[in-house]
Image: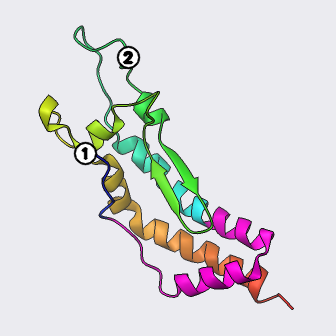
């Protein structure tokens, strides 16, 4: 049911930069790149929470469904290579994928709130990433002996 995002940001020279980072094998540098990735993705958090559907509980709703759990489940995961924003989990919010991508058998239309958040904030994410990576290069690579 999971699909890849239609919204990505392509950075020229990123693979070469990642190759150089791996070649250096400096823990501080890897942590700095991870922090830059995470900071860029965290720009989306407020918009993603704003875009996520606010459910209403009625008499027919299941006991498992509690409005607001989807908002609280939106998290950022980052590594030195990438950053991902996710919503839901198999144990706490198992319906997140059905809400986001739709579930035809249950007549649930897709509500692609994460994609909309990325579409609205892609320029800010790109600017944040560029600024943070430039700082990493300046601090760790240009000043290296």
> Above or below — where is 43 with respect to 111?
below
Residue at 39% of width from left, 20% of height from top?
66
Nearer to us in this view, 88 or 2:
2
Location of the C terminus by quadrant is: bottom right
Nearer to us in this view, 54 or 140:
140
- Write the start and end of the magenta stretch as one range: 7-36
Instruction: From the viewer's perspective, tell me whether residue 133 is left or right of residue 104.
Output: right
Q: Position of residue 81 (x, y in %)?
A: 57, 69
> Above or below — where is 75 with respect to 59?
below
In contact (CB < 8 Å): disc 1 and disc 2 = no
Q: Position of residue 46 (x, y in %)?
A: 47, 47
The residue identified by callout 1 is 101
Q: Secondary structure at mark 2?
A: loop
Residue at 33% of width from left, 65% of height from top?
7
* Residue that extends furthest to the top in the rendered view of this protein: 59
The residue identified by callout 2 is 64
């Amino acid at each position: 049911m999971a699909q890849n995002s239609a919204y990505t940001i392509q950075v020229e020279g990123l693979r070469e930069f990642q190759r150089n980072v791996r070649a250096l094998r400096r823990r501080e540098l890897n942590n700095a790149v991870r922090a830059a990735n995470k900071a860029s993705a965290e720009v989306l958090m407020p918009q993603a929470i704003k875009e996520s559907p606010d459910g209403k509980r009625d008499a027919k709703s299941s006991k498992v469904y509690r409005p607001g759990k989807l908002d609280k489940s939106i998290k950022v995961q980052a590594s030195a290579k990438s950053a991902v924003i996710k919503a839901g989990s198999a144990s706490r919010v198992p319906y997140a994928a059905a809400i986001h991508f739709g579930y035809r058998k249950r007549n649930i239309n897709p509500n692609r709130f994460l994609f909309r958040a990325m579409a609205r904030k892609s320029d800010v994410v790109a600017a944040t990433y560029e600024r943070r990576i430039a700082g990493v290069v300046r601090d760790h690579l240009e000043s290296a002996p």
